Image (spheres, rainbow, N blue to C red):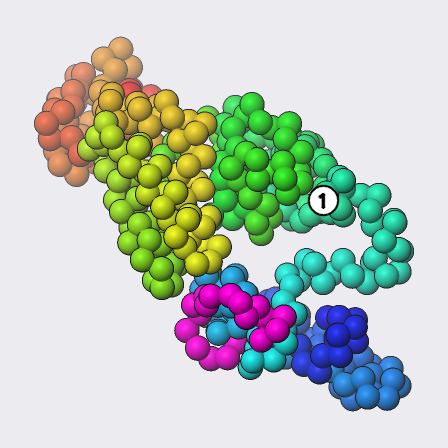
Amino acid sequence: MIIGAYAIEATGGVIYCRAEYPLAIKRLEIAIDQARKNGYLGKNILGIQGFNFDVFIKEGAGAFVCGEETALIASVEGERGMPRKRPPFPAASGLWKQPTNINNVETFANIPWIIINGAEEYAKYGTEKSKGTKVFALAGKIKRSGLAEVPMGMTIRDVIFKIGGGIQNDKKFKAVQMGGPSGGCIPEHLLDTIVDYDSVNATGAIMGSGGMVVMDEETCMIDVAKFFLDFTQKESCGKCTFCRVGTKRMLEILTRITEGEGEEKDIEKLEELAYQIKDSSLCGLGQTAPNPVLTTIKYFRHEYEAHIRDKKCPAKVCKKLLTYEVDPEKCTGCTVCAINCPTDAIDGSRKEVHFIRQDDCIQCGSCFTKCKFDAIKVY
């Protein structure tokens, strides 16, 4: 940021960091204090007459929409974080109506390395259109989670299986959700997609903040889409009607589907709403919020159809679509399942085979989790 300030003759810098990250803020405060004491911030930096620049931290209130630059500016100014139309662009009229350069921390972090080692050295990493490296946060059903910096051009398969160590408990890979909450889900047959902006975008996902949430065979893709859409729907600032209302309607449809009340035209309704939201939203939140739904429909449509037509969840995740039965060959009559059933839906005497009354069963799964003899079948 100091280098950038020297280049464009800026006198003030802001690091916007969510207040939920107290350790990051503490470390930033230490670094800024060290920079001031060593003459890298303040007046006449490094003895250069007239080179005056200082940095302060703005602790954000945790609004996802403030990842959009004009909403971030509003938040720094003490206003509600909501995007505005452009032009004017921040470079002409940004923070306090002054010309403002906004970049992600990851972008700024590349600048010293490029200056020290040269642009040609930096360009040796990556692909023709996406140079350098990218930091990913590996999470989900992966053996080695954490942050990993990889060169652009590496395949998603290599990131997950070579760097991340593969899938937990050696289960089957199903999908990876890339790009944060508004990213898309990439299936197994696209694992050899290379990590660069054009290739990832072509799958329907986005590079975004560099999130990689890995899912295994026991993941329900409709449940995943609902989870991420629930987040983006709550984080919508409400300014754009389609983002505010459209995401709510999509979430309602997904909820119905996972509860066994899906209808034949629900998939088409979801797609129609998704494209309307993408086309009618002012900022990146609304433009990308439908991605988890669109990609799961594109690559896992059969799961939607199973939920809607067969009223079954192939991954056995959506509780209201599950049926629990006692396996008579494994039941020992220990009565643990009956004791723990909240609706007394299980009949049977001690040391005799029990059975579940389906009309009274609420699919809570208590019998399945409590049985020590693997006597409860779920389908």
Instruction: Give the residue displayed 84% in from the left and 43% down from the top.
Output: 124
Tell me which secondary structure the magenta stretch mostly adopts. loop
Dot 1, crowdedness within 10 Å: few (<14), some or many (≥20)?
Answer: some
Query: Could you say which is closer to the camera, residue 346 or residue 239?
Result: 239
On the question of residue 145 being in view, the answer is no
Q: Residue furthest front?
A: 87
Q: Residue furthest top?
A: 329
Residue 278 at x, y percent in the picture: 42, 48
Instruction: Give the residue displayed 50% in from the left and 79% down from the top.
Output: 77
Place residue 83 in its image quadrant: bottom left
Q: Is residue 16 above or below residue 323?
A: below
Q: Is residue 247 above or below residue 334?
A: below
Q: Is residue 17 above or below residue 154?
A: below
Instruction: Give the residue displayed 55% in from the left and 70% down from the top.
Output: 88
Place residue 101 in its image quadrant: bottom right
Query: Could you say which is closer to the camera, residue 315 or residue 236?
Result: 236
Residue 340 at x, y percent in the picture: 21, 36
Q: Magenta stretch: residue 90 in it?
A: yes
Provide the residue designation for mark 1: 130
Residue 283 at x, y percent in the picture: 46, 58
Query: Could you say which is closer to the camera, residue 308 or residue 291?
Result: 291
On the question of residue 63 being in view, the answer is yes
Q: Quadrant of the N terminus?
A: bottom right
Place residue 379 in its image quadrant: top left
Residue 305 at x, y percent in the picture: 31, 24
Q: Amino acid at mark 1?
A: Ser
Q: Which residues are magenta?
A: 76-93
- Position of residue 116 in the picture relative to residue 237 (left or right): right
- Position of residue 24 in the picture relative to residue 87 (left or right): right
Q: Magenta stretch: residue 38 in it?
A: no
